[in-house]
């Protein structure tokens, strides 16, 4: 497993973009997750795995714990969590069992608060 990208930036350099296209999986962090992990994304050299396994790999690639923000103690998505695969909510796919392939982008949005 390897990762590249620049902490705090959402855009990879042109060389990395062309290397990423079709060869790796990009996991993007939004809102409080981005502040927590102090980076916009992580690029993982994985393919053909479930969203659940990808989340575990992303957690290992980032030194700050973040999974507790999106998953409950039973490993299910917390209410209000959005996990998108190429812009589609995993609830409309196969949930956390959705298979991730080369070049896919997974976006993580923890539950939001407001009032």
Image (cartoon, rainbow, N blue to C red):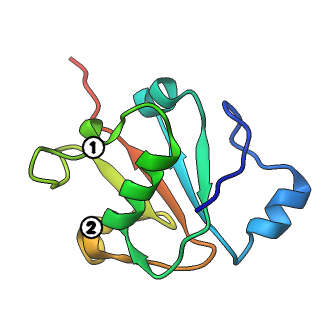
- Residue 91 location in percent, x, y? 25, 67
Measured along the vertical axis of the image, is residue 45 above or below residue 7? below
**What's the distance in space between the residues labelled 1 and 2, CA to CA?**
12 Å
For the residue pair 88 and 23, the one nearer the viewer reads as 23
Question: Residue 70: which numbered mark, if any?
Answer: 1
Residue at the farthest left position: 74
User: Residue at the spot x=48%, y=34% of the render?
Assistant: 63
Question: What residue is drawn where x is 64% and y is 70%?
Answer: 24
Q: Quadrant of the C terminus?
A: top left
The crowding category of the residue bearing disc 1, from other C-alpha atoms within 10 Å (few below 14, some 14 to 19, many at least 20), is many
Residue 54 image point, x, y percent: 42, 63
Residue furthest to the top: 115
Taking depth in this image into account, of 62 and 102 the one nearest to the observer is 62
Q: Where is residue 22 in the image (x, y as percent from the top left)?
A: 70, 78
Please tell me the numbered disc located at residue 96. Answer: 2
Q: Is residue 49 visible?
A: yes
| 114 versus 19 height, above or below | above
**Is residue 98 rendered to the left or right of residue 26?**
left
């Amino acid at each position: 497993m390897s990762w590249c990208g620049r902490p705090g930036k959402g855009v990879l350099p042109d060389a990395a973009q062309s290397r990423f296209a079709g060869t790796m999986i990009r996991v993007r962090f939004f809102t409080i997750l981005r502040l927590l992990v102090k980076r916009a994304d992580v690029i993982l050299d994985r393919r053909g795995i479930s969203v659940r396994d990808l989340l575990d790999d992303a957690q290992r690639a980032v030194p700050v714990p973040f999974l507790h923000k999106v998953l409950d103690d039973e490993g299910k998505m917390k209410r209000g969590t959005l996990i998108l695969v190429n812009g589609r909510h995993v609830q409309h796919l196969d949930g956390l069992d959705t298979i991730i392939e080369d070049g896919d982008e997974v976006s993580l949005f923890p539950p939001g608060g407001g009032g």
